[in-house]
Image (tube, helix red, strand yellow):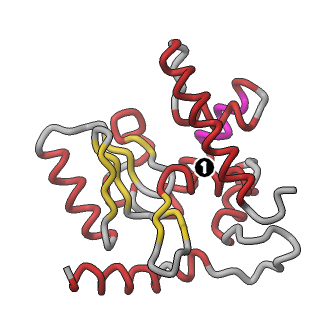
Amino acid sequence: MRDQAVRRTLAATALALLYSSSVSAATEPLIPPAYLSIAREVGVPPRLLYAVALTESALRFSTAAVQPWPWSLNVNGKTEYHASRADAYRAIRRHLAAGRRSIDIGLMQVNWRWHRETLQDPWKALDPYHNLRIGARLLRDRYRECGDWLTAAGRYHAPAATSRSQALAKTYRHHVAKQLAQLPGSG
């Protein structure tokens, strides 16, 4: 248990580069640089991209800080937070060996079953920048279908046209809107 806490602390420290910001707080407060860069590259609103990542993979640290966690998985509806990329990779390999294919991976919880080709392989799927870029592209593609960013966020989570999927998308859209409202500068 202590070993896992130490690995999580070390991993969080290593992630400081992903989340550290040289961006002026006046421009886009609390949106980490990787989100700003990839959002601009792909053409999605940075705040929305970060809100979706928070909705998908948020982890509360002992400092009460909440951040998207790059080594989170959701396997058949059960969330797992791993201390390191290597730990998450081993878990994915175990799940795949056991025949489980519905695995949401990383910051943006990109689903292995539906996006395996784009994710490429489990190790690459856990690369925070690769995962974030894929999620941003999926979000942009949903926007191109509907023309509304919050609707696109709902469809990011539940893209099917069934009534059940539409209900899930509506609920998810509300979760993302709540995350957006909690981000500084949302007024």
- Residue at coordinates 41% horizontally, 48% vertically from top-left? 119
Position of residue 76 measured from the top left corner of the image (x, y, whole percent): 28, 38
State which region is magenta.
138-144
Position of residue 125 measured from the top left corner of the image (x, y, whole percent): 40, 55
As displayed, is residue 95 above or below residue 138?
A: below
Assign the C terminus to one quadrant of the image: bottom right
Residue of label 1: 52
Residue 91 within the segment the image draws in magenta: no
Majority secondary structure of magenta residues: helix
Q: Amino acid at mark 1?
A: Val
Q: Is residue 147 left or right of residue 51?
A: right
Nearest to the observer: residue 140 or residue 173 = 173
Among the 4 quarters of the image, the one containing residue 154: top right
- Residue at coordinates 34% horizontally, 53% vertically from top-left? 73
How many marks the image carries: the answer is 1
- Residue at coordinates 40% horizontally, 41% vertically from top-left? 111
Secondary structure under tag 1 reads helix
Nearest to the observer: residue 73 or residue 118 = 73
Assign the N terminus to one quadrant of the image: bottom left
As displayed, is residue 134 above or below residue 151?
A: below
Q: Is residue 107 left or right of residue 46?
A: left
Among the 4 quarters of the image, the one containing residue 24: bottom right
Q: Is residue 69 left or right of residue 181?
A: left
- Residue at coordinates 73% horizontally, 61% vertically from top-left? 183
Position of residue 149 measured from the top left corner of the image (x, y, whole percent): 74, 37
